[in-house]
Amino acid sequence: MTHHIGAKPGEIAETVLLPGDPYRARWAAQRYLENPVLVNEVRGMLGYTGTWRGHQVTIHGSGMGMPSLSIYANELIKDFGARTLIRIGSAGAMQPHVKLRDVVLAQTASTCGSPSQSVFRELNFAPCADFGLLTAAHRAALKIGVPVHVGGIFSSDTFYDERPDLSDQLQRHGTLCVEMEAAELYMLAARYNRRALAVLTISDHLLTDEALPADQRETSFGAMVEVALEAAFA
């Protein structure tokens, strides 16, 4: 038990999927895990542990933004022994060829700042995904036939865009999409020698203003969860 995770020793698996939304954690656990058990509900951040094809898996909410994810990832790694951490979340497309419902595998994650900035100071550290997870996820996406893109993404500290000039430059440099957590997850994975990957579903498009309605998000996110589980145990 930690300040933010009420699980007992042994109740968190070495493989953890991290959706931002705690209710999405509940949905994914009930749909994809066998015998999911609620192991955390401190501050309403739900975490479930069950099995997938005989493998123990925890699906735990991380909250919105890098500071929130940093709290949960730190505790999952340092106090509960998590070794493989895969973010499953939504993202906004930044390129014309990336469409709604497509899956993006974040090879790298750029950011203007994260909780790790105080560690690196003047260094612009370049966090990246675990190559084994990345290649396994790509194979899994092709296997199930979901449109998939691999490349750099942007992890933003803000949801409401106040920097259209920055968005223009990110698009110019091929950034696939924007979300709010992956860069810090990759930094923590590098620091503690863990495996990490962000598997993202495009729910909004910054160029076209398209967006998935709320009732279609869960069904569209199923492929992302399948890709993450396949990659974790490839």
Image: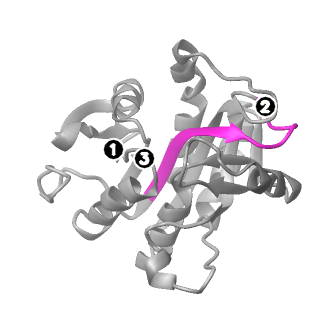
Q: Give the amino acid type for the residue marked by disc 1 in the picture.
A: His
- First-in-chain label (2 vs 1): 1
Contact between labelled residues 1 and 3, with CB atoms less than 8 Å apart: yes
Q: Nearer the viewer, residue 114 or 55?
A: 114
Residue found at the far front of this picture: 162
- Of helix, strand and loop, which one carries label 2? loop
Q: Which of label 2 and label 3 is nearer to you?
A: 2
Q: Give the amino acid type for the residue marked by disc 3 in the picture.
A: Leu
Q: Nearer the viewer, residue 177 or 195?
A: 177
Residue linked to disc 1:
60
What crowding class fits label 1: few (fewer than 14 Cα within 10 Å), some (14-19), or many (20 or more)?
many
Residues at marks 3 and 1, CA–CA distance in whole angstroms: 6 Å
Residue linked to disc 2:
99
* Picture layout, residue 129 above or below residue 198: below
Residue linked to disc 3:
17
Q: Which residues are magenta?
A: 85-99
Image position, residue 9 (x, y; %): 13, 58
Q: Confirm whether the magenta stretch covers residue 87.
A: yes
